[in-house]
Amino acid sequence: MAQAAAPDRLVSPSIDPDEVEKFSRIAGEWWDPASKFAPLHKFNPARLTWIREQLSAHYGRSGAAPLEGLTLLDIGCGGGLVSEPMARLGASVTGVDAAQANIKTAMVHAEETGLNIDYRWAWPSNCWSRTGRASLMWCSISKWSSTWPTRTPSCAIAHGW
């Protein structure tokens, strides 16, 4: 039985190939606070505090590992700037991104920091069957494709899907 070759790129109506290419070109800069991701590094502590507070309140948890025992699907994970802190808070994390270069950067950084995160190169509409059920989902997309009603930065948390 012949096996299909892996695709060179992901194609989906919800993915803007130009955005994937843009982030692929700068994927090596995700963890450099002086890079094009500098604003994200400055914003990330506030974003992570908000996520932690929301999840801790929702699940009635506190302490050093309030996400222990929960599973998180991080859609549009980029280089892992949300995935890694969530793993440190105890969550079992799967990070998904349409840019293969982002996934490679995230995998290398997680390995360097000793974190066990399941990073996958996939698009959101195809990741549900690949990841199984999760306690929660975090979605951070920098620019929705033209098929979505808005093109502004978005984020969302969904529980128990």
Image (cartoon, rainbow, N blue to C red):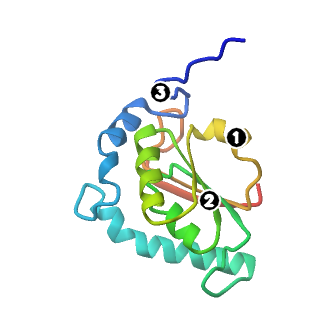
Q: Which quarter shows the C terminus?
A: bottom right
- Disc 3 marks which residue? 9
The amino acid type, in three-letter code, at marker 1 is Arg
Q: Position of residue 128 (x, y in %)?
A: 70, 42
The amino acid type, in three-letter code, at marker 3 is Arg
Side of 100 relative to 117 (left or right): left
115, above or below 139, in the image:
below
Q: Earlier in the sequence, mark 3 or mark 2?
A: 3
**Closest to the observer: 96 or 22?**
96
- Disc 1 marks which residue? 130
Q: Position of residue 44 (x, y in %)?
A: 41, 69
Q: Earlier in the sequence, mark 3 or mark 1?
A: 3
**Closest to the observer: 5 or 57?**
5
Question: Which residue is rendered at x = 51% and y = 48% of the image?
Answer: 76
Q: CA distance from mark 1 to mark 2?
A: 13 Å
Q: CA distance from mark 3 to mark 1?
A: 17 Å
Farthest bottom residue? 63
- Disc 2 marks which residue? 93
